[in-house]
C-alpha cells in the first residue's frame, strides 16, 4: 500500500485509509470481534492510516480502534481524530429515557454531544480522545463539521490546534466537512496541513474541483477524500440506494447506472472506478473508506489495486458524465 507524506508535516498516510465510523455502530450494531477483525484485515492489506472521531458511537469507535491497534508498532501507523463535539455524560435516568439511534449510531444514549470549538473545548476534546484511544499523541486532528460554528472555529478552535501542533501533541491539523466552501476558506486563511472532504469529489459530485482542489494545489496542501461512494449509491446503484444518507433521486440513480455500464464495458467494477477517480487529482493524498467487516476491507483494497484504463475516463467525459 503506497504511503504519502502530508506535504507540510512529517505525517504519512496510506493511499487508502480505514474509516472507523462503522465500527462505532453507524446505523447498525457491529460486534466487538467483528470490529477488531476489520482493523486486523486493514493491517493485513497494508493500510496504516485510521480515521475516527468522538462523535462516532459516543466514543465507541475511538475505544475499539485504540484496542485493536494497541499491540501494533506505534511508529508504523497514523491515527486521525476530530474535535468540536464534546461528550457530556448523562444520568442513568436520562439514558433510560432515550431509545433508538444516537445521532445515527446504534449505541446506548450514555452521553450528550455538545458543540464546542472554544480553545478549552478543543484541548479537552483531544485529551478525552487520547484517553479513549490509549495514545499519548494523535497524528492528525480535524475540526469536525464546523458548518454552523465558523466564527468560533476560526477564532478559537483553529488557533488551539496550532498550539497543540507546536507542542507536539498533534502532528498535523485541518478540518473535515461535507462541503467545500469553508474548507477552501481554511486553506486560504489558515496554516492547516490537510483537509478531509467527504462526498464532494466523486463520480457523481465534482464540486471540489471548482475551488477547493485548485486552492490546495496552489498552496501545496493536501486533501483526503471521503465518501467516495456517496454513502452507497456508487457501491451498489439500485432503486432505494442511499445518496448522501437519503434515498437517491431518480436522475442520480440513472446517472450512476450509466457510469456503471461504461466502467463495466472496460472491465472495471463501479466500486473500483469510484475509488480511483479522486486519486487522479494531484492535490489528493488519499481516499478514506468506512468499513465494518473484514470482507469490506479486503474488497476496498482489491478495488484499489485494480488497473483502470485512461480510456474509461475518456468515455465518461465524452458522455458528459465527468
Image (cartoon, rainbow, N blue to C red):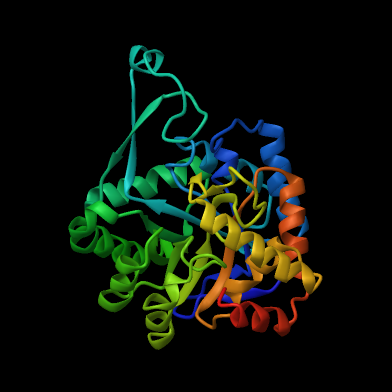
In front of the other: 30 or 71: 30
Measuring 53% from the left and 65% from the top, which residue is drawn there?
204
- Quarter holding the C terminus? bottom right
Q: Is residue 119 visible?
A: no
Measuring 72% from the left and 49% from the top, which residue is drawn there?
296
Q: Quadrant of residue 95?
A: top left
The answer to whether 8 appears left or right of 145 in the picture is right
User: Looking at the picture, does residue 23 appear above or below residue 155?
Assistant: above
Q: Report how many numbered discs are placed on residues in the image.
A: 0
- Expressed as whole percent of the image width and height from the top left, the position of residue 43 reads 72, 55
Measuring 42% from the left and 24% from the top, which residue is drawn there?
109
Q: Quadrant of residue 285?
A: bottom right
Q: Quadrant of residue 184?
A: bottom left
User: Looking at the picture, does residue 87 appear above or below residue 298?
Assistant: above
- Expressed as whole percent of the image width and height from the top left, the position of residue 98 reads 39, 18
The answer to whether 245 appears left or right of 47 in the picture is left
Q: Is residue 167 visible?
A: yes
Measuring 33% from the left and 75% from the top, which residue is drawn there?
187
- Expressed as whole percent of the image width and height from the top left, the position of residue 50 reads 58, 56
Amino acid at each position: 500500500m503506497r504511503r504519502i507524506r502530508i506535504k507540510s508535516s512529517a505525517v504519512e498516510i496510506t493511499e487508502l485509509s480505514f474509516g472507523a465510523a462503522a465500527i462505532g455502530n453507524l446505523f447498525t450494531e457491529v460486534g466487538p470481534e467483528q470490529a477488531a477483525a476489520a482493523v486486523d484485515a486493514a493491517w493485513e492489506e497494508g493500510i496504516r492510516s485510521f480515521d475516527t472521531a468522538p462523535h462516532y458511537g459516543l466514543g465507541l469507535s475511538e475505544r475499539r480502534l485504540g484496542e485493536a491497534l494497541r499491540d501494533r508498532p506505534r511508529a508504523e501507523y497514523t491515527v486521525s481524530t476530530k474535535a468540536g463535539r464534546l461528550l457530556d455524560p448523562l444520568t442513568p435516568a436520562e439514558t433510560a429515557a432515550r431509545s433508538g439511534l444516537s445521532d445515527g449510531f446504534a449505541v446506548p444514549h450514555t452521553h450528550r454531544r455538545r458543540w464546542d470549538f472554544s480553545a478549552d473545548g478543543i484541548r479537552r476534546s483531544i485529551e478525552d480522545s487520547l484517553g479513549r484511544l490509549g495514545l499519548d499523541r494523535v497524528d492528525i486532528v480535524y475540526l469536525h463539521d464546523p458548518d454552523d460554528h465558523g466564527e468560533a472555529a476560526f477564532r478559537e478552535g483553529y488557533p488551539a490546534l496550532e498550539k497543540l501542533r507546536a507542542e507536539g501533541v498533534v502532528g498535523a491539523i485541518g478540518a473535515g466537512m461535507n462541503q467545500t466552501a469553508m474548507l477552501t476558506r481554511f486553506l486560504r486563511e489558515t496554516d492547516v496541513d490537510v483537509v478531509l472532504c467527504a462526498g464532494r469529489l466523486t463520480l457523481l459530485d465534482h464540486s471540489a474541483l471548482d475551488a477547493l482542489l485548485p486552492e490546495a494545489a496552489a498552496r501545496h496542501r493536501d486533501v483526503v477524500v471521503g465518501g467516495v461512494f456517496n454513502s452507497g449509491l456508487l457501491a451498489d446503484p439500485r432503486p432505494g440506494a442511499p445518496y448522501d444518507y437519503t434515498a437517491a433521486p431518480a436522475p442520480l440513480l440513472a446517472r450512476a447506472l450509466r457510469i456503471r455500464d461504461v466502467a463495466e464495458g472496460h472491465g472495471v467494477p463501479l466500486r473500483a472506478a469510484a475509488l480511483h477517480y479522486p486519486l487522479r487529482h494531484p492535490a489528493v493524498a488519499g481516499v478514506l473508506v468506512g468499513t465494518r467487516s473484514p470482507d469490506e476491507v479486503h474488497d476496498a483494497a482489491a478495488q484499489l489495486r485494480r488497473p483502470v484504463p485512461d480510456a474509461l475516463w475518456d468515455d465518461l467525459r465524452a458522455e458528459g458524465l465527468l
